[in-house]
Amino acid sequence: MGHAIALILIERYAQRKANDANHHPPLLQAGAEQGASDEQLAEAGLVVKQPAEEFRFQDIFTFNRTYWYLTASCFLVYGAILPYNNIANKLLQHKYDISEDHADNFLLIPFLIGAIGSPFLGFAVDFFGRRSFLITVSASILVLSHLLLAFVDSAQLYPAVPQVMIGIAYSIYAAAIWPSVSLVVDEANLGTAYGVITALQNFGLTVVPLIVGAIQSKTDTYIWCSVFFAAFAAVGTVFGVLVVIEDLRAGGILSKPSQAFQGAAADAEAQGQLRSPVMYRPLMQNAAEVEGATLPTQYDHPDPVL
């Protein structure tokens, strides 16, 4: 819940700074030095007044189905990964009859894969897209890894194999899920969206270990713990499929590479559909039209750069 509150406050601060950025301080100062009034500056387009946006709890209910499918998937998939690490050492000791230190060596594998692979996977997701597909595939890999731990005999399954699968699933999922949120939620509510999904994720990370502990205590075995994790990830896979279906209905925004969005934004800006904060020339021309106001030559540059 603390994450949710922090992200909501960050969102409101970012909105206030964004409003302040629309006042173009250098040009305002130049116009003021030449005696232009606030009304004249507003007419010249140097001051853009925007209504203040405040957090409203009811905004949560405006989030689309894709967002809620992503949230459910996050709750389930992370619930099948991080709580598993709490019992992984004991599980491997019990299944493979190895020492605690030996089991610790295998526990490092998912974290090493995540540390090494995450930057490359993040770049791949940005470049190729396919986020909804990757979310579904990574959850299904997680299902298989837990089923292997539950039902495959230790003599036929080297302990590093399921750990590698969990590490790959974890890395792919993290690289795909978090950027997806920003693509399905309005920018004004982005902090709230991340706050809600993180709060529910942390709720799952609190409740799932309690359930797993109860299962292990009652059955006195780790097999059913692995079955529980597999079932959790399986439901997460179902929600991944729902994300794919809903995304296709919405035009496949999660499947597009990040470069496509950048290209679309550039095209829209070139057509005058977007207002870029670095497009000072129209503002400077408007400022020059203010009665009795002129700009210093230091601002009269053909290609102004922030």
Image: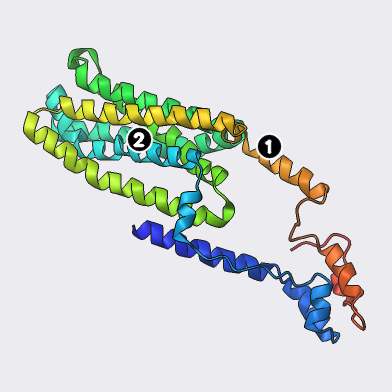
Task: Please state which of residues 102 and 69 is positioned toward the viewer in this rendering.
Answer: 69
- Check disc 1 and give the amino acid type: Ala
In this view, the residue in front, 8 or 87, is 8
- Position of 68 with respect to 231 (left or right) is right
Position of residue 138 in the picture relative to residue 190 (left or right): left
Within-10-Å neighbours for mark 2: few <14, some 14–19, many 20+: many
- The Cα atoms of the two marked residues, 1 and 2, are separated by 28 Å
Q: Does residue 168 show up?
A: no
Residue 195 in the figure: left or right of residue 109: right
Say what secondary structure mark 1 lies in.
helix
Percent of width and height locating residue 245: 51, 28
Name the residue at 69% across, 43% down.
262
Residue 72: x, y in percent?
Answer: 38, 39
Instruction: Tell me the residue at 38%/34% (across/down).
Output: 170
Q: Earlier in the sequence, mark 1 or mark 2?
A: 2
Which residue is disc 1 drawn over?
A: 260
Q: In this view, which residue lies farthest toward the top?
A: 156
Quarter residue 276 falls in = bottom right
Q: Position of residue 27 (x, y in %)?
A: 79, 74
Relative to residue 285, is residue 59 drawn left or right?
Answer: left
The location of residue 77, given as percent across then percent down, is 35, 35
- Helix, strand, or loop for circle 2? helix
Instruction: Return the residue at label 2.
Output: 77
Question: Does residue 27 sit above or below 86 in this rendering?
Answer: below
What residue appears at the point 52 percent right and 38 percent down from the top-left corner? 122
Confirm whether residue 287 shows in the render.
yes
Q: How many marks?
A: 2
Q: Quadrant of residue 96?
A: top left
Colour mapping used in the image: rainbow
Residue depicted at 33% across the width and 26% down the height:
234
